[in-house]
């Protein structure tokens, strides 16, 4: 009986890809893009390619078109960036290896996540991953319930299903940027100005997360050397009041990274933006995403002047 | 190795397969080796403590049985001193040094607390006590005794077994039995549901609120306090169910540790249903030796002197129970509060009976019972605040803010660490779990008859398995009671 049910769930899951949450559909679509070698047009040489890796904050916060436009003036030839932020993802070495194998490597990579805090686990050390592999349809009931709840607000089941399909198309058009609209419960996808949470720590500066240690870092460093990549450890973002402001330059982190010439630390540990730029307590809305991307571009451009390691 | 992880599932599969493939005379030794391996997955050096406790009490048991008169008592005292000495050194030395503000020159090493030390120490002590009292014979087979102390399903978080229950079973390994397999799997699966689907989900909200109680509204703190009641029950009883289920598959029956404690009508009844193996341990080895309720041969209520002695007995038992849980003032306060509940309950019983009669509740015993259940749960939930809070200041902050609840802050529930779907699911899963628990204990006739049919039973099993798959949290959250 368990096997028959497994088969039934699997068939349903395979055949209904767009009932999944937007973020999950986007994750699957990005994996497919990577697999099929569709990240960069063939006309864009590796020297102009930029990839930003990260979790859902990057997914919703980095707009490639805005970044390209912002850094174009400071460089010759411009860049072509791709947002590879994926929900709940913290390890990128395997993605970079994959890009190398499929001849899609960029020359510059922007990272936001603290790899040393999230060392990749062996398969048996990661139960969620084991369950996910044994039961790829694990989230199917959750997705179906949410889909059924949201469908009436989106013109019915069929329209909502098509909307999922369109979302993926839009995400691919926007080179990986995706606004998680479904997660926002606030008018105009904008938090009120006085928004705060009980878990906020407005007097605490978050500990600098980048430490050159751990299996993931060793792997990234090795890949940087082997493929002549350059990594930028760029700031993530939080709401104003969620944490105390970070110092303008993450000098502690930069100090730690001194022995690694292929890694540049161009700015603070994180940016703070007012709540109105957020669509939910964690993620930026489109307006916030543009602001964050412009800030990153500004940092990279300044970094180019400061360190001579900026974008071409 | 946690029960709710892939390595344990693989370990258990291998153990079951080899266990039943071996001739009966080797099974005990194999289970002992497996149990030591299981413990060494946490710490290799600390297996030395298990071996030390085993050897001390094995020798003490035989010595007590062979000795006469005062020598028996001396052996018992020596065994207890060794057991509690180890427990004190590892668990309480730093706490007492800091609390009593002993001079800094008195250097007390801060060791990592061995997993489950309170459980196997108490289990070992119950053996020497029972041999001393002549309730069980001293065990002459070191392998059997070592397995009694270290049997892996229950060695790190109970149930605290008595020698009279477990040792005879260890002498007669049961053959493979498919009915026991199914029953064991069913019990373990239910434990897994409680742990992964409810407790670990509730933990996210509880942790988020307890990290900063001052940042949340009173209503939200009530929700977190209530969810912690649910979390600790589902976590600990979930662990106990997995322990009982896995042991049953291997052919051994462990003590039932919980009997729907949140359906208790008084705190005294709560303690007859919650962590039964610990509360009966304190009853048999502390409370009754102190005189229990019949102090000096007289029942409480006979005169003021005996009543005071009984109060002191209750206070001692509950303070020790609090201290057993952890070397912290919050646990002592939690134990003291429960002791106070019991004493206050006994003191006000005639008054409450009169009050209930005047309110007319005596005419409606079912409504009266429900009122009592609600009040008991409120008292228990408030006490859990001390158990969960990181320190006394946080506990008092929490209690202070609980006094001004209001409902305006309840919307925060959906931003307290869990996405909206998971939070809604949790709020539905909690009554569902308690409903199933109730039905398991009190099945209506129709359900009991339907349960006899495979066509009803197997879909329920399949639904249970997929409930874990679909809604379980698999991020290796430790069981709360492992810290004790």
Image (tube, coloured by chain):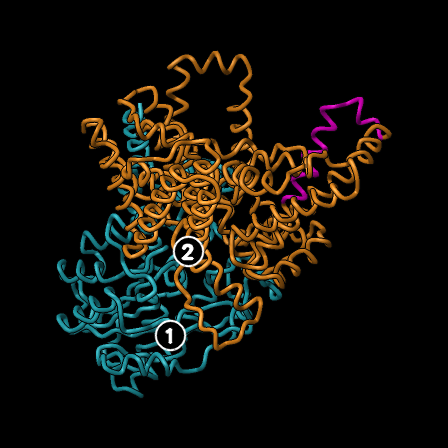
Chain colours: A cyan, B orange
Q: How many marks?
A: 2
User: In the picture shown, does residue A279 fall above or below A257?
Assistant: above
Is B242 or B128 nearer to us in this picture? B128
Q: Is residue B448 left or right of residue A64?
A: right
- Residue annotated with mark 2: B86
Residue furthest out toward the right = B358
Q: Chain of mark 1?
A: A
Residue furthest out toward the front = B69
- Residue at disc 1, secondary structure: helix
Is A99 or B69 nearer to us in this picture? B69
User: In the picture shown, does residue B427 fall above or below A231?
Assistant: above
Give the x, y percent position of residue A298: 38, 79
User: In the picture shown, does residue A44 fall above or below B246?
Assistant: below
Residue in the picture at 26% in, 42% down: A133
Q: Which residues are magenta?
A: B359-380
Q: Give the quarter of the image for residue B71.
A: top left
Using the numbered discs, state the Cα–Cα distance from disc 1 to disc 2 in whole angstroms.
57 Å
Quarter placement of the C terminus of chain A: bottom left
Give the x, y percent position of residue A236: 40, 69
1 or 2: mark nearer the eye = 2
**How many residues crowd around disc 2 within 10 Å: few (fewer than 14), some, or many (20 or more)?**
some
> Mainly helix, strand or loop, the magenta region?
helix
- Residue annotated with mark 1: A296
Give the x, y percent position of residue A57: 40, 62
Give the x, y percent position of residue A34: 22, 55
């Amino acid at each position: 009986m368990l096997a028959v049910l497994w088969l039934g769930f699997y068939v349903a899951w395979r055949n209904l890809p767009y009932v999944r949450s937007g973020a999950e559909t986007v994750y699957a679509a990005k994996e497919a893009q990577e697999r099929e070698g569709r990240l960069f047009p063939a006309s864009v040489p590796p020297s102009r390619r930029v990839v930003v890796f990260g979790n859902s904050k990057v997914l919703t916060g980095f707009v490639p078109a805005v970044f390209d436009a912002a850094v174009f003036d400071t460089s010759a030839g411009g860049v072509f960036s791709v947002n590879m932020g994926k929900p709940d993802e913290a390890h990128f070495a395997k993605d970079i290896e994959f890009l190398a194998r499929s001849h899609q490597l960029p020359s510059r990579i922007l990272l936001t996540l603290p790899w040393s805090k999230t060392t990749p686990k062996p398969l048996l050390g990661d139960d969620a991953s084991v369950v996910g592999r044994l039961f790829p349809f694990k989230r199917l009931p959750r997705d179906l319930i949410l889909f059924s709840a949201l469908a009436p607000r989106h013109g019915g089941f069929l329209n909502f299903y098509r909307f999922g399909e369109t979302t993926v198309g839009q995400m691919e058009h926007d080179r990986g940027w995706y606004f998680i609209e479904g997660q926002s419960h606030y008018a105009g996808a904008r938090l009120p100005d006085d928004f705060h949470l009980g878990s906020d720590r407005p007097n605490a500066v978050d500990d600098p997360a980048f430490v050159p240690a751990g299996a993931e870092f060793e792997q990234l460093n090795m890949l940087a050397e082997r493929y002549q990549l350059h990594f930028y450890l760029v700031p993530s973002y939080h709401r104003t009041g969620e944490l105390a402001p970070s110092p303008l330059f993450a000098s502690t982190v930069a100090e730690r990274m001194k022995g690694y010439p292929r890694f540049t630390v161009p700015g603070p540990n994180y940016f703070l933006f007012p709540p109105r730029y957020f669509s939910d307590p964690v993620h930026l809305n489109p307006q916030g995403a543009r602001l964050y991307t412009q800030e990153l571009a500004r940092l990279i451009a300044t970094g180019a002047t400061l360190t001579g390691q900026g974008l071409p | 190795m946690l029960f709710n992880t892939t390595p344990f599932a693989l370990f258990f599969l291998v153990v079951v397969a080899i266990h039943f493939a071996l001739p009966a005379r080797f099974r005990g030794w194999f289970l002992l080796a497996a149990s030591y391996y299981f413990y060494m997955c946490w710490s290799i050096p600390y297996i030395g403590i298990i071996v030390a406790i085993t050897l001390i009490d094995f020798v003490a048991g035989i010595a007590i049985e062979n000795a006469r008169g005062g020598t028996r008592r001396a052996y018992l005292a020596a065994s207890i001193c060794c057991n509690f000495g180890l427990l004190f050194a590892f668990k309480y030395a730093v706490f007492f040094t800091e609390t009593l503000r002993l001079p800094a020159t008195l250097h007390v090493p801060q060791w990592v607390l061995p997993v489950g030390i309170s459980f196997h120490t108490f289990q070992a002590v119950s053996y020497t006590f029972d041999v001393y009292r002549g309730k069980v014979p001293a065990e002459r087979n070191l392998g059997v005794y070592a397995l009694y102390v270290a049997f892996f399903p229950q060695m790190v978080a109970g149930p605290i077994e008595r020698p009279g229950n477990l040792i005879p079973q260890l002498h007669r390994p049961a053959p493979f039995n498919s009915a026991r397999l199914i029953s064991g799997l069913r019990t373990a699966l239910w434990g897994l549901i409680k742990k992964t689907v409810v407790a670990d989900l509730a933990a996210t909200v509880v942790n988020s609120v307890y990290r900063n109680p001052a940042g949340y509204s009173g209503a939200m703190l009530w929700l977190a306090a209530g969810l912690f009641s649910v979390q600790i029950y589902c976590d600990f009883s979930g662990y106990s169910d997995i322990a009982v289920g896995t042991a049953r598959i291997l052919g051994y029956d462990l003590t039932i540790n919980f009997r729907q404690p949140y359906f208790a009508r008084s705190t005294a009844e709560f303690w007859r249903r919650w962590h039964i193996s610990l509360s009966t341990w304190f009853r048999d080895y502390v409370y009754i030796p102190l005189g229990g309720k019949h102090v000096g041969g007289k029942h409480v209520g006979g005169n003021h002197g005996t009543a005071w002695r009984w109060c002191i007995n209750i206070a001692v038992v509950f303070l020790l129970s609090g201290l057993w849980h952890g070397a912290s003032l919050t646990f002592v306060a939690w134990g003291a509060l429960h002791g106070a509940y019991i004493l206050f309950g006994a003191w006000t019983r005639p008054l409450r009976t009169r009050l209930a009669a005047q309110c007319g509740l005596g005419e409606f015993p079912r409504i009266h019972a429900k009122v009592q259940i609600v009040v008991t749960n409120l008292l228990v939930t408030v006490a859990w605040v001390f158990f969960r809070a990181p320190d006394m200041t946080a506990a008092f902050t929490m209690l202070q803010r609980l006094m001004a609840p209001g409902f305006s802050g309840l919307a925060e529930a959906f931003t307290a660490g869990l996405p909206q779907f998971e939070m809604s699911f949790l709020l539905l899963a909690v009554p569902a779990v308690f409903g199933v628990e109730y039905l398991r204990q009190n099945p209506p006739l129709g359900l009991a008859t339907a349960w006899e049919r495979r066509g009803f039973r197997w879909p329920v099993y399949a639904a249970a398995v997929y409930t874990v798959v679909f809604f379980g949290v698999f991020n290796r959250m430790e069981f709360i009671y492992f810290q004790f």
